[in-house]
Image (cartoon, helix red, strand yellow):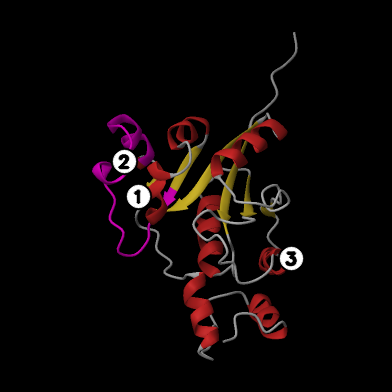
Amino acid sequence: MTAPLSISRIALLGGSFDPVHNGHLALATAAWQSGKFDAVWFVPAASSPFKIGRMNASAEERIDMLRLALNGCPAFDICLEDISRKGVSYTIDLIARLCKLHPNVRFTFLIGGDSLRTLAKWKRATDLVKCCDFETFGRSGIPLDADSIGFDPQTNRRLLKNYHPEFDCPVSSTQIRNAIAANAAIDGLVPPAVADYIRKHQLYSA
């Protein structure tokens, strides 16, 4: 009788990472330190359905910044499955491809509280929450309860079991881009190597 293959637990942190910032790293670190996962994969989107035509840095630049940010973090890796296919990125399609490529992995998507509030509007959301777990981290000013999520009551309660309202790292890529355009400092918002890359390549300047 063949012994069953072990199941790995991988957390996925998706986003445009335009640019990657300390909030992304803090969220990934919190997930890793929970002890639930064997690794955290950062999944840059080719084109988010919510940001079509509004990417600022190129795919290559966003990947370069991710590599700089994750250097020295062996538990973190970059998954290029989404960005290599180009086109609009939908989570349900990404999960389907990853599950086919990695049949012995159970994937969990890491999202912020703002994303959980709109999750029911994502493409094939009902199917998505059945085939993938979600771990949600707090965002400033985004209260969450079972009535604010949008699925059936049982699914809402299940999703809230993996909600961490105590987490809060109020940094956004928009905030960073706006600061750069205004010639303001971004120290403490992105890793130093990423800040150097942005300056060297003159990204996000007005």
Per the rendered image, the range of residues in magenta is: 136-159
Q: Nearer the viewer, residue 37 or 83?
A: 83
Does label 1 or label 2 sit earlier along the sequence?
A: 1
Toward the bottom, the furthest residue is 183
Up-down relation of residue 165 to residue 67 (above or below) = above
Query: Would you call the spot at circle 1 few (<14 residues within 10 Å), some (14-19), or many (20 or more)?
Result: some
Toward the top, the furthest residue is 1
Does label 3 or label 1 sit earlier along the sequence?
A: 3
Residue position marked by numbered label 2 in the rendering: 150
* CA gap, disc 3 and disc 1: 31 Å
> What residue sits 49% from the left and 37% below the top?
133
* Quadrant of image for the N terminus: top right
Residue position marked by numbered label 3 in the rendering: 60
Residue 71: in magenta span = no
Residue position marked by numbered label 1 in the rendering: 117
What type is the residue that disc 2 sits on?
Gly
> What residue sits 70% from the left and 24% below the top?
5
Find residue 168 and name its label. none
Query: Would you call the spot at circle 3 few (<14 residues within 10 Å), some (14-19), or many (20 or more)?
Result: few
